[in-house]
Amino acid sequence: MRENFSSGGPFEAEYGYSRAVRVGDQVWVSGSCARGDAVDGDAYEQAADALRVIAGSLAEAGASLADVVRTVTYVTDIADMALVARAHRELFGEVLPAATIVEVSAFADARYRVEIQVDAVVDEGKPTTA
């Protein structure tokens, strides 16, 4: 069974995608950026906020950061890697998902410095809805 989850963000309708999709015990969360005041922060603040956005999407799909098996992080300046890594390490703790970080030329909003997507596998026995 496929479940789509929306955050109601404008890009979702314009582009035609879901914030998160769950099929069985797997959850995929689309690339997520900082929101609100965090958009004007440094790469650490943006990464931490993007991960909070992701945590909310995972929760809506019946998962958590503890279920994440893979992250892909995009940055506009690879020099920000240490700041992004700090946020990643703080929010994931001992989960230690497989991870990739890639420098890209730009995002949809020029203020964005970081975008993060995750894949999760929900532990057996966990309900499919939060």
Image (cartoon, rainbow, N blue to C red):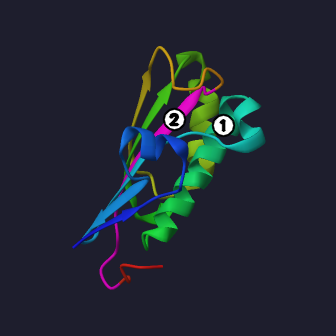
Q: Residues within 10 Å of mark 2 (few under 14, many from 20)?
A: many
Residue on which the image places disc 1: 46
The residue located at (50%, 18%) in the rendering is 106
Give the residues drawn in magenta, as a range. Answer: 112-125
Nearer-the-camera pick, 34 or 12: 12
Residue located farthest toward the front when viewing the structure as drawn? 14
87 sits to left or right of 11: right
| Depicted 122 relative to depicted 78: above or below | below
Q: Is residue 128 magenta?
A: no
Q: Position of residue 59 (x, y in %)?
A: 51, 69
Residue found at x 59% / y 34%:
84
Residue 36: x and y, percent? Answer: 73, 43
**In the rendered image, the vertical position of residue 91 relative to residue 104, given as above or below:** below
Residue in the image at 63% along x and 40% along y: 34
Few, some or many C-alpha atoms within 10 Å of disc 1 (few <14, some 14-19, many ≥20)?
many
Q: CA distance from mark 1 to mark 2?
A: 8 Å
The residue that mark 2 highlights is 115
Residue 41 in view in this figure: no
Nearer to the camera, 17 or 25: 17
User: Between residues 65 and 14, which one lies in front from this camera angle?
Assistant: 14
Question: On screen, 29 above or below 85?
Answer: below
